[in-house]
Image: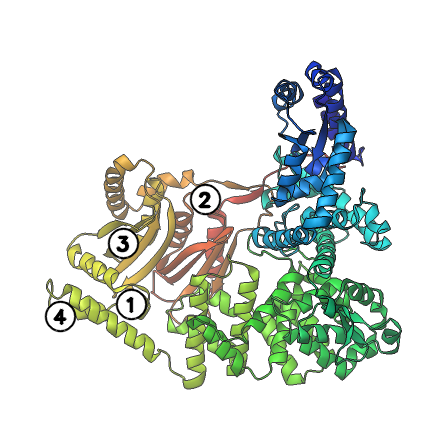
Amino acid sequence: MLMQKKELLVQAFLAGQEPFFLEQLTRALDEYFFTVYEKSISARRMVVSNNPFAIIALGGYGRKEQCIHSDIDLLILFDTSVPPEVEAFVQELLYPLWDARFEVGYAVRNSDEFIAMAFDRFDILTTVLDARFICGSSLIYSAVREKFRKELYTGHYKQTLDYLFAHGINRLENFGDSTYLVTPDLKSGFGGLRDYHTLLWYAKIKSDIKERRDLEYYGFLSHFEYETLEKTLAYIWDIRNRLHHITGRKCDTLHFEYQTEVAGLLSLQNQDSRPDVEVFLGELHARMEFLKQINQITFEDIITSSRIRKESATPRLTKTDGLIIHKRRLYFANTVVILQRPELLLKIFLESGRMRIPLSIEARRVVSEFLHLVDEDIKTDPANIKIFKRVLALSFWEFNVLTVMLSTGILERFIPEFSAIRNKIQYNHYHLFPVDKHSIRCVQVMNSFRIPGTDINTSLYADVFKDVRNKNLLLVTALLHDIGKSDPAKEHSNTGAEIARPILERLGFTATEAADARFLIQNHLLLAKTATRRDVFDEETAIYTASKVGKIRLLRMLFLLTVADSMATGPKAWNDWTENLIKDLFLKTMRILKTGELASKKSQRLIQRKKEEVLAMLKESWQEQTIMQQLDAMSGRYLLYMPAIHIADHIKLFRNLGDRRFIWQVSKEDDSDIRTVAICGRDKPGFYSKIAGVFFLNRINIVASQAYPLGDTHILDIFKVMPPRDRLFEQKKWEKAETDLTRALDDDHFLDKIVDKIPKHITIASGRRPEPNQVRIDNDISSFFTIIEVLTYDFPGLLFTITNALYRSGLNVNVAVVGGKVDQIMDIFYVRDLENDQKIRDPQKLTQIKTAIIQRLPKIHAKEVLHEKN
């Protein structure tokens, strides 16, 4: 009967016909427990034998917030002793629920045990606060509540508030700030439902409120805040229930794979060209931002109630007339002074950053209510512009003044163009944060460079930041670098540079300074893209970058902007590999701009040291002259990148090649299931492609690869691969692959048979918007090679598909950089024409090459999600 009621309620909810789903599902559960209690023989026996008890709802069930797959938490509470008959009653009460696959947790306690445990463990304390009587002896329930409150006020009040405060800090560390995440935790992250629960618990501790409505009656929220809270909770509970329905289980993290489907279940009012999922996530983040502010209200009150010394309660003046400090919070002296001096709406943030004292919630409310006073005169006043720039310089991750400006609305009022990226979602696996939060985070990272680091890289950032003359310009650029993402239909770097033009003018920058800022915005991806998509060991890469940037002052600022932008994006954009590539490119480019040198003395010393190490390893096997000839024939890129011990192994391969077409060495990586296959062979057209094809033929999955020339006649290809699935026959699989490669080199059509095995279509999982296959050709950065960049999704035979298309188009792969771009694959090839061994310059042939690759790549499709729109 209960399951039927639940199913009917769920169907009505999904059809948009049950706006009070949580309360109705809670009521259905209450009726079930009351009915079982009323009919239970074992319950009657306990009551008759003078062992009355109460059935009490706990947790979300106690708060009447029962979602589709929420747990049901129960307490069976006795006054003093717990009789043995309770076991039979528990079976009557809960076995039917367990059989119906309800998640039910229960406890059987007497009153003293329950209260003692409440003050010993925070999770039990909150269940007492959420406890709600269902049926049984109401006197026992009332007595426990009265005893709990008496003990709370007489001996545990401060400790309980400390628990509440510490729980919030731990929650932020464990779950993160959901208002900053593209995959938010709807329940436990900051901005999630726990922020509301914390306020509710605090209000129950302090004022013993009974219902959510009491938050307004007892002054914890204003009327406007309470009305907004009701709408916000309804929205998030709606999303949470739909997430439960889609996953078929309790799930509170809105992972990528569910977001599109959830968005499709909502009746969205989408007025722009953005996908529904981005509109939905933007709205969700705005709602969660409000809950986060509610949490800040709670923390402020907790600090005021529990952690402020009496002597600090007297208001004191600040250096800014019209602002006061009260209980470690900034307030306006009164609202009249704001009408007389509206610049106080900005000065309070400067005072906050300077003194590291947060604005009170009341001050934040006042700022939001008086935004209309921030008119053109205020925005263009040089004194106020100076205040704004100083606020930027005082915004750190640990003390987040700029974020408070964003949440109160004054940042958008001062820079109206910023509103277009407010809660703007970048829907991919690459960006962790919405655009507005990412931009602010970028400023905060930039400010962290003011502090000297403890390692070589952070020390470099501090040194470079110190050398930047116009730090205000750099911080404003960091804030505006993604302003062009307001229009998803346009390329955001160029668009952003144009949007920034009037902003920079209003902020009083000179024509030269504004031009510098626009250049930085327009090129803020230059260093990251060049470092990760080009061969940084090729000196021409640094020459190209130097010619593009042109000035040392611009390079310094561009480098810091690149680092801050990458750090603020997330771990998929910033790791040790990316950091070192960008740093190396910056140092090489700086050297060229400063001295005109191509190769650094440090690089030359490193290569010389490696040569000496290799010579020491091999001198017993070959003559020194022979080894040095081999080393001198190797590219500087290879010698810089490759460890000395591997160089020695590769020389051994080359020396053992003899008259064979190729020779390879398969080795197992330390602490990894990856195999490294080093292949040395004669540089025959299609060699690289045929290796990739043989691996595909033998179901050996390629993870990454690099190709290096060994002099004019030989080549070294290094592949990182997953081993064959059947490890017992791994050696035989490698022997077969070796035989297949020999046949492929002898017969140019040997691999034709596997072309049909390449998938014609790829389906991208739900929650991901598929990007089209892209082929980009760069003929500028290298004097000797045409660089072909392929962006697509991974599939079996990917590398063979691309390189075979290149080979059939009459190209030879001289250098290859194969790897990932988070949710897609980015493969880069340095190629030359097989006929004349030159770059490809003919526009028609370049078009043919691009077409040939695109035609051979599978078509990309999104996984269809079947649902009914409300």
Count of number-bearing discs: 4
Local secondary structure at mark 4: helix
Q: Is residue 602 left or right of residue 174?
A: left
Label 1, label 4: how far apart the Cα atoms are = 18 Å
Residue pointed to by mark 1: 639
Image quadrant holding the C terminus, namely top right
Task: Tell me the quarter of the picture where residue 443 sits.
Answer: bottom right
Q: Given the current orientation, which residue lies at the most extreme top position?
A: 41
Q: Earlier in the sequence, mark 1 or mark 4?
A: 4
Crowd tier of the residue under label 4, counting other residues whose Cα lies within 10 Å: few below 14, some 14–19, many 20 or above: some
> To which residue does mark 2 refer?
795
Q: Which residue is mark 3?
A: 678
Q: CA distance from mark 3 to mark 1?
A: 15 Å
The percent coordinates of residue 853 (x first, y second) are: 46, 52
Who's the residue at 68% across and 16% down the image? 42
Q: Secondary structure at mark 2?
A: loop
The answer to whether one can see residue 120 in this image is yes
Q: Categorize mark 3 by other alpha carbons within 10 Å: few (<14), some (14-19), many (20+).
A: many
Residue under circle 4?
624
